[in-house]
Structure formats: C-alpha cells, structure tokens
Image: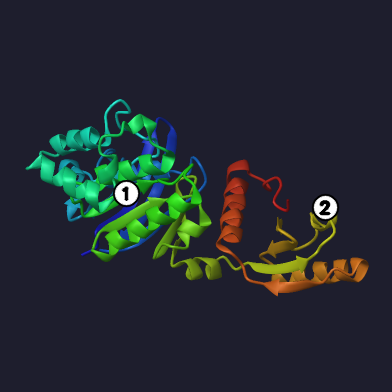
C-alpha cells in the first residue's frame, strides 16, 4: 500500500482554485521532490496531505487514513517542516524540543529529547538559545522537532531556503539516511541540485500537476533540444532572441545554452547564425533547469492567454 495515494485533490479559496485535481502516489522509503514556481499550490497540497487543510474535492489516503475524514490520525504520524522557522527563539534548543515532546505526549520526554539531540549532532548546543542559531542550525533544530515523534512520513516545505551549500549538503545526507531507514519524504524545493537527489519529482504549476517521474524521465518527456556554444560574443543572446525554434537562451559561465522544442527549426536557425558569425553550436544535454524554465513559460502562456514574455532571455 502506498504511503500517499491521493487523487484529484482540489482546494479553493473563494473563487480561486489553488489546487486543481492533483494526484500523487508515494511509496514507503521514497524521497519525492515537489517542484513549481511560487504560488503554484505546493504548500496547499502539502497541507492537505498532512491533514491541516480539508480538500474541497478529490479523495485518497495518507498512511492508510482518509484525507477527508481522518486528519487527526494523519497528523500524529506525519512530521511537517514549514518554510518559516516556527520555534521559540527565547528558548534553548533543548527547551524547544521538550515543548514539542509535551505536545506529542512522548514519554519519557528526556529520553526522546536526548536521542534526537544526539542523532542530529545537537547535544553540544542543547543550552544555546534558538534565536542565536545560524540558518543551518535552525534548520537542523526544525528537522529534529519534526522527527522526534518518529513519524512515518516527513513533509518538508522548502527546508533549505537561505541555507549555505555545506549545510544544504549535510541536510540532504541526513534525509537520505532517514529514507534508508524507511521514512518517506515529500520535499518542495526550488534548487535543481536538490531535485536531482530525489528518487522522483513532481512538477505543479498554477494548481495543476504538469509532470511526474524520475528526473531523467521528466527531462526526456519535455521533448527539448539543447545546443551549446563556447566563448560566444556578448551580443549573441540578443541576436538569437526571437529566431525560429529558439525558446531559451541562457549563459553558463563561458558557454551559452540554446533550447527549444522544435529541434529541426532550432538547428536551422543556429546553422544560419554559425554561417554569419562563425560561432559553432554543438548538441548538448538538456538539464532539469531547462525543463523547469520551459514548464514555467508554458504555464504563463496559459495564464496570460498569449506568449510569455522573455522566453528567450
């Protein structure tokens, strides 16, 4: 049985449909990355899955409990880490965890707190005020509070925003260790390197699920063609913008990536540019970021009723 199995989840706020018939399956021990632009409905979907919001439509189960009628049972078995640090900054790390242990009625509390502190390398900072912690240590405290009651499902809403690369790497190492022990994880992120560390990804835009699968499957399914030019002149992006087949132009260091859906049209346009400028374009590998940008552009097309501005810049 899937840990998460939801179908056609829908949530409205007034006349606005924030989540529109979203379906998702997550198996035990999986790490699933949840991607999408700001305002796409990721947080609302996560809150329906963890029992904080009741769907207006759709059905499904989380950890065997009905998402519409058994929210209380779901909450007891889920750890939810929000975007905003939500612990008491004038309490120590130990005091914050003791407070959480009381909420979950864990007994003996001291044992749960001690075990959690040790597991995440927080023992030496037990008596440090939460408000004095750096972003990385606040993140670790938040994770500790989410897993102390030994949940079966961990929901992480952009957990590494504003955290330095070393702390992000250590955080993800910990997430993979937890998943290896059987914990299931759904994590929303804007970082492509983090998405690539997930077993599968799901992309949502303006409330609708656009794509789901392993990273290589999603990249292949986007149908994009990528060409790369090295040591391109500074004015080349402006020259390429608007040419047939050219949908994205992005500098990466000394290289220039040019991406489009119509590979033949793109190749023909670049051949013309090569003849005029001498710049050589070689076939490159489409990245997850290329796909992410393409999905965003298509969604803006739908919202605006016309071509999204700046697709080739």
Residue 149 appears in the picture as rendered? no
Horizontal relation, residue 258 to residue 42: left or right: right
Question: Which SS class for mark 1?
Answer: strand
Where residue 224 sits, quadrant-wise, is bottom right
Q: Position of residue 175 (x, y in %)?
A: 33, 57
| Quadrant placement of the N terminus | bottom left
- In this picture, is 270 found above or below 185? below
Horizontal relation, residue 193 to residue 149: left or right: right
Total residue callouts: 2
Which residue is drawn at the image coordinates 23% and 46% (left, top)? 117
Where residue 75 sits, quadrant-wise, is top left
Of residues 155 and 169, which is closer to you in this image?
Answer: 169
Mark-to-mark CA distance, 2 and 1: 42 Å
Question: Which SS class for mark 2?
Answer: helix
User: Mark 2 = which residue?
Assistant: 238
Which residue is drawn at the image coordinates 34% and 45% (left, top)? 140
């Amino acid at each position: 049985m899937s840990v998460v199995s939801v179908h056609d989840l829908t949530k409205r706020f007034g006349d606005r449909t924030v989540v529109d018939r979203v379906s998702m399956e997550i198996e035990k021990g999986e790490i699933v990355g949840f991607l999408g632009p700001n305002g796409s409905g990721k947080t609302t979907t996560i809150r329906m899955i963890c029992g904080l919001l009741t769907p207006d439509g759709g059905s499904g189960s989380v950890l065997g409990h009905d998402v519409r009628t058994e929210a209380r049972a779901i909450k007891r078995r889920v750890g939810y880490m929000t975007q905003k640090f939500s612990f008491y900054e004038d309490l120590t790390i130990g005091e914050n965890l003791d407070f959480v242990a009381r909420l979950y009625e864990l007994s003996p509390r001291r044992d749960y707190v001690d075990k959690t502190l040790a597991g995440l390398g927080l023992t030496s900072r037990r008596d440090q005020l939460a408000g004095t912690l750096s972003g990385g240590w606040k993140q670790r405290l938040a994770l500790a509070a989410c897993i102390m009651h030994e949940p079966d499902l961990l929901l992480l809403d952009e957990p590494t925003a504003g955290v330095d690369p070393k702390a992000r790497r250590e955080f993800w190492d910990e997430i993979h260790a937890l998943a290896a022990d059987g914990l299931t994880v759904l994590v929303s992120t804007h970082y492509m390197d983090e998405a690539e560390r997930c077993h599968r990804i799901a992309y949502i835009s303006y409330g609708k699920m656009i794509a789901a699968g392993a990273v290589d499957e999603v990249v292949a399914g986007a149908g994009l063609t990528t060409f790369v030019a090295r040591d391109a002149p500074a004015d080349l992006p402006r020259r390429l913008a608007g040419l047939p087949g050219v949908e994205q132009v992005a500098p990466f260091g000394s290289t220039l990536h040019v991406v489009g859906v119509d590979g033949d049209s793109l190749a023909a346009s670049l051949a013309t540019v090569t003849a005029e400028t001498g710049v050589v374009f070689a076939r490159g590998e489409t990245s997850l970021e290329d796909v992410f940008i393409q999905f965003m552009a298509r969604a803006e097309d739908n919202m605006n009723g016309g071509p999204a501005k700046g697709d080739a810049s």
